Image (cartoon, rainbow, N blue to C red):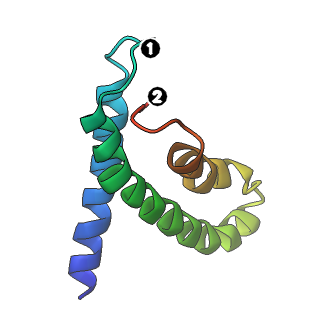
Amino acid sequence: MRRWIAVLFAAALSLSVTTASAGSASAPHEEPSAGAITFDLLIVRPLGLVTTVAGAGLFVLSVPFSAIQGKSPLDAADTLVVKPAQFTFTRPLGESD
């Protein structure tokens, strides 16, 4: 069971990175197509939510290690929680920037 969770998590991360890099090649002033909006709503946003929740879990696990090392956990919070949450909740539908 844990292997399937790891495979799904890896797939979610790879898809979110792939769609983010694919969207940056298009012109920023173009309106997204209906297909792009639908794909974003049905596939990318739920994967972004899964990535945000998984990142929050990893962040909670990493805080004690950051404290032991004397480092601020804010960098980890930004990478694991804030950026995926912004990608999931604040960008317009169909855009991958």
Q: Is residue 13 at least partly visible in the picture?
A: no
Q: Position of residue 96 (x, y in %)?
A: 41, 33
Judging by the rendered image, the residue that carries numbered circle 2 is 97
Label 2: how many Cα within 10 Å (few below 14, some 14–19, many 20+) = some
Q: Is residue 8 at least partly visible in the picture?
A: yes
On screen, 52 above or below 34? below
Judging by the rendered image, the residue that carries numbered circle 1 is 28
Q: Position of residue 49 (x, y in %)?
A: 47, 61
Tell me what residue is drawn at x 60 percent, y 56 percent. 81
Tell me what residue is drawn at x 21 percent, y 78 percent. 4
Q: Position of residue 25 (x, y in %)?
A: 31, 17
The quarter of the picture where residue 95 lies is top left
Q: Label 2, secondary structure: give it.
A: loop
Q: Do the residues under discs 1 and 2 have CB atoms within 8 angstroms?
A: yes
Q: Amino acid at mark 1?
A: Pro
The tag earlier along the polypeptide, 1 or 2, is 1
